[in-house]
Image: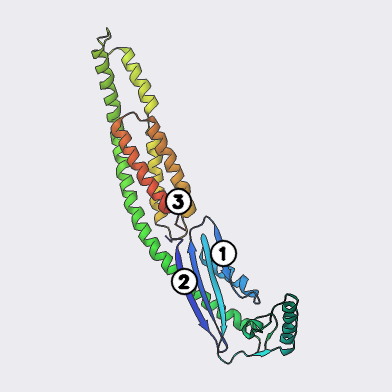
Amino acid sequence: MKSMTGYGRGEATLEDFSIVVELSTVNRKGLDMRVNFPREYLALEGLIRKKIGSVLARGMVTGSLTLSFNAGAQSANINKDLMQSYIEQLKEVHQNMGMDFKPDTVRLMSLPGVLEDSGKSIDEDLLMDCASKALDKALSQLMDNRGREGDAMKNDFLERYQTMCNLHCDIEQTYPQALADYRERLTTRIKEAALDVEIDDDRLAQELVIYSDRSDITEEVVRLNAHLKQFKVLLEKDEPIGREMDFLMQEMGREVNTTGSKSSNAALSALIVAFKAELEKCREQMANVE
């Protein structure tokens, strides 16, 4: 079992440049990737999506791929003619507005085209190889973090699974007693009302049959038991189980709600409420399972 929450960082360095990848994930129904990277290297997008898609099935992935050149690998020239053109245009704008103009060298250097790269270009194969290594390291750390959190979640699910199994057993055992209690209450009411009715007559038997049919939860108990078994099977799987588990939780919820609607016995109702409480806790936790 894997959590959908995690963080990973990876770095790879070559002679001329290095790449750092940082990734973080949170829960999401599908797989959504939003990773920033230098747009002048568009080939990286396919690599990023392929790498992430190969290990993640669900979750919102955000992060960045940053490329930096090592000392001496890149140098830059100043386009003096272009800078002078910027200065003249800015000076004219200021004069038209009746303002003094004082050139700001730092800002001028940041204008488009002023700094020209005179270094060698990056070989695409080297770029992809370096990015791949950094991505692998980031994804490995990310998966380790998701796995550790997933193990903790699995232990919690197993405890709740055992609690729900115990409650299911109690519900199964309490139902026959609920029928007996209804018979006793009905008999007591007839006696207290001093009605001229024989306790063992056909009318009483008919009432008991009607009540039994209306409150019969045998089908729900059987299906709920099957769902609990499937719950345990899913917990032992290695692949993503989030979608399957979400559907199973909905089915379990339907059976429990139907059982509750049929119950008029206080003890049985209390057990059903307790079961629903455990199921709701599982649903909340399940929202973060891959």
Q: Residue at x 42, y 34 (%)?
A: 258
Mark 3–mark 1 distance (CA, rounded to whole Å): 23 Å
Circle 3 residue: 245
Asked whether residue 122 is in view, the answer is: no
Which amino acid type corresponds to the residue marked 1 in the rendered image? Met
How many C-alpha atoms fall within 10 Å of the one at disc 2: few (<14), some, or many (≥20)?
Answer: many
Closer to us: mark 3 or mark 1? 1
Mark 1–mark 2 distance (CA, rounded to whole Å): 14 Å
Closer to us: mark 2 or mark 3? 2
Which amino acid type corresponds to the residue marked 2 in the rendered image? Gly
Circle 1 residue: 33
For the residues labelled 1 and 2, say whether their Cβ atoms are less than 8 Å apart.
Answer: no
Circle 2 residue: 8
- Left of 112 or right of it: where is 254? left
State which tag comes first along the sequence, 3 or 1. Answer: 1
Q: Residue at x 33, y 50 (%)?
A: 160
x then y, percent, for residue 287:
45, 53
Quadrant including the N terminus: bottom left
Q: Residue at x 44, y 39 (%)?
A: 254
